[in-house]
Structure formats: C-alpha cells, structure tokens
Image (cartoon, helix red, strand yellow):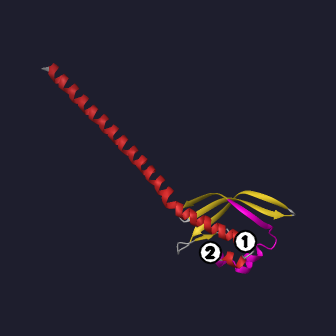
Amino acid sequence: MKNISFKNHKCITLLVRSFLLVLILFLCINFSACTISSNIKSFFKEKFSDEGEKDEVVKIVDVFFNLLIDKDYEEAYWYISSKDKSQKSLEDFSNEFKDVTDIVSINKNWVEIKNNIAVEGMDLTDFYDGEEKVFKDIEVSLVREEDESWKIVFWN
C-alpha cells in the first residue's frame, strides 16, 4: 500500500510540475508575441502614417529656405512658430539676416517626427567671399501648432 501511495504522489508531483512548465511556456510565448505584434504594428503605423507628415514637413522647410534664398523675409516670417512670433517681431527676424551670407542651396538628408515635434537634417551651401561653403548636418526643428500646421522653430 505504501508503494502505491508513493507512486501516486510522484505522479501528482510530476503532473503539477508539467502543468506549471506548460503554463510558464505558454505565458512566455504569449507575452513575447504581444511585444512582437506591438513592434510590427508600430513599425507599419510609423511608416505609413508619417510619410504624409514627413512630406509636409519637407515642403515647409523647402518653402522657408527658398524664401530666405530669395530674401523674402516677410513671407518667410509666416512659417515660424507662433511662440517665436510672440517673442520677436518681423523686424527682429529680418535683422537676423543682415550679416548672413547668401544661401545657395539646401540638401535634405532625413526627417524624423515624434508626436508634435519634427526635425529635418540637411546640408546647407552658402556663398561667402567668392566661394561656396557647405555646412553639414544642420538640424531644423518644427513644431505642430494648435491648428495642426507645422511651423519652424527659429529662436530657441
């Protein structure tokens, strides 16, 4: 009788351990699948939903710098953030460019958007003292305004 009881106890212990092992494996697989699923979902969401926003940011930066190239500071001022406009006037903005060299071109390298902030990395070519100079990896920051438009952060 003792022998049967000992075998039953071993069997029950083995079943409980097996059940716990299967439960742990199931939970591990389930949680890792959630993480993988979440990562895949965020990857596709970022790729497809941000493309339109990235295009919009690139367009705004292009227009802004083309206006600066044309020295149309009054129109370029419209593209800076409302916070910047509340701190400094159009005259202050125009005065920033008095001693600036001529911007020849910009070359966009990358755009990154996180929530309501965008950053575009670019190389800028300017003309000074009869020669062109390239400034690499300049970062232009933009902020999404209350009306959902993107504006350039000109003054920190």
Q: Magenta stretch containing residue 94, yes or no?
A: yes
Image quarter (top left, top right, bottom left or bottom right) of the N terminus: top left
Among the 4 quarters of the image, the one containing residue 142: bottom right
Number of the label disc, if any, that sits on residue 139: none
- The residue most toward the left is 1
Image: magenta residue range: 84-107
Say whether residue 37 is left or right of residue 87: left
Taking the spot 53% from the left edge, 60% from the top edge, the residue there is 51
Which callout, 2 or 1, points to the residue nearer the camera? 1
Taking the spot 81% from the left edge, 60% from the top edge, the residue there is 132
Circle 2 SS class: helix
Image quarter (top left, top right, bottom left or bottom right) of the C terminus: bottom right
Point out the tag, 2 or 1, that comes first from the N-terminus: 1
Identify the residue under disc 1.
68
Q: Residues within 10 Å of mark 1 (few under 14, many from 20)?
A: many
Among the 4 quarters of the image, the one containing residue 8: top left
**Mark 2 and mark 1: Cα distance apart in space:** 20 Å
Q: Residues within 10 Å of mark 2 (few under 14, many from 20)?
A: some
Say whether residue 38 is left or right of residue 110: left
* Residue 90: % across, % down: 71, 80
Say whether residue 14 is left or right of residue 54: left
Number of the label disc, if any, that sits on residue 83: 2
Q: Amino acid at mark 1?
A: Leu
Say whether residue 69 is left or right of residue 43: right
Circle 1 SS class: helix
In front: 3, or 24?
24
